[in-house]
Amino acid sequence: MPDSEFDIIERYFQRSQPMRDDVLLGIGDDAALLRVPAGKQLVVAVDTLVAGRHFPKQTSAADIGHKALAVNLSDLAAMGATPAWATLALTLPTADTAWLQAFSSGFFQLADEYAITLIGGDTTRGPLSITVQVHGFVEPGRALQRSTARPGDAVYVSGTLGEAACALQKILADEMPEAALLQRLNRPQPRVALGQSLAGLASAAIDISDGLLADLGRLLTASSCGATLWPDRLPCSSALQHLPAGQARDCQFNGGDDYELCFTLPEDKRKALAAVQAQHAV
């Protein structure tokens, strides 16, 4: 079993495969050396997950590794950015070999999907928490923001909302969620490609992590706008259709952990959205 920070880094997080070309110096030194491509702006996001607060304590290590990266990639998606690099700060109660192997496997499986290089981080001992910082690129003037919605824009969401919240409710009630619901809670799929397609099309965007009403409210506040919502127009998954209407609606509007995108669109861009919907099956 590894004892030191350096053992953990070398065994589980320092990979032998080649790094990205824009990583001049990665894990193994006091800091990383990176090259931002010409004609790009750097987009940076960071999130911390704490056991018992952001995921149930019985969540598998592989699922935690996936989710710790996914929630950050969702922030990049909301900006229309292309992911590139990540750092990881890991606080562990014990250096458990099996846990570390599974965690790093879940993390790197998603990182490889988006050609992300882990460029550094830190480990220490304490209650389980994971902090990931991600870096991505966007063309100047094309980053999606919260503050740029305008009166007359329509409000859209990707996918369906509420499944993750429903799964969490069942877990807290000592019930076993259906596999599809549990997948939405433990393995969210960041809408990176959709975010990139919305850059230059959507007027504003935000990722839905704290529930539709909370996150749309932040977008509206930043944009000095209001909105009218029609609940029956919100897409509802088959899993939620079996719930009492009030419970399903609460999961959809207030549940959180969706990691879908909420965005606004001017009227003259709505026809172009149809092609984006078809491309990304949303």
Image (spheres, rainbow, N blue to C red):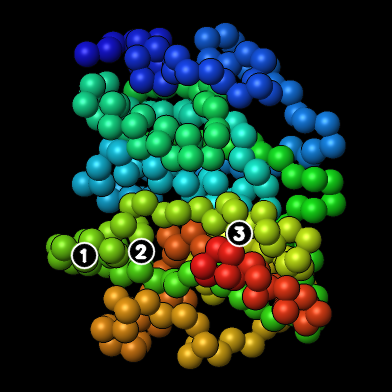
Q: Is residue 43 left or right of residue 73?
A: right
On residue 187, the disc is none
The residue that disc 1 covers is: 177
Q: Closer to the N terminus: mark 1 or mark 3?
A: 1
The answer to which quarter of the image holds residue 278 is bottom right
Residue located at (36% from left, 64% from top): 164
Q: Residues within 10 Å of mark 1 (few under 14, many from 20)?
A: some
Q: Is residue 136 above or below residue 169?
A: above
Q: Position of residue 157 (x, y in %)?
A: 56, 72
Q: CA distance from mark 1 to mark 3?
A: 28 Å
Q: Is residue 234 above or below residue 147?
A: below
User: Which residue type does callout 3 highlight?
Assistant: Leu
Q: Is residue 132 left or right of residue 124?
A: right
Q: Closer to the N terminus: mark 2 or mark 1?
A: 2
Choose mark 2 or mark 3, whichever is in front. Answer: 3
Q: Is residue 231 above or below residue 18?
A: below
The residue that disc 3 covers is: 194
Q: CA distance from mark 2 to mark 3?
A: 20 Å
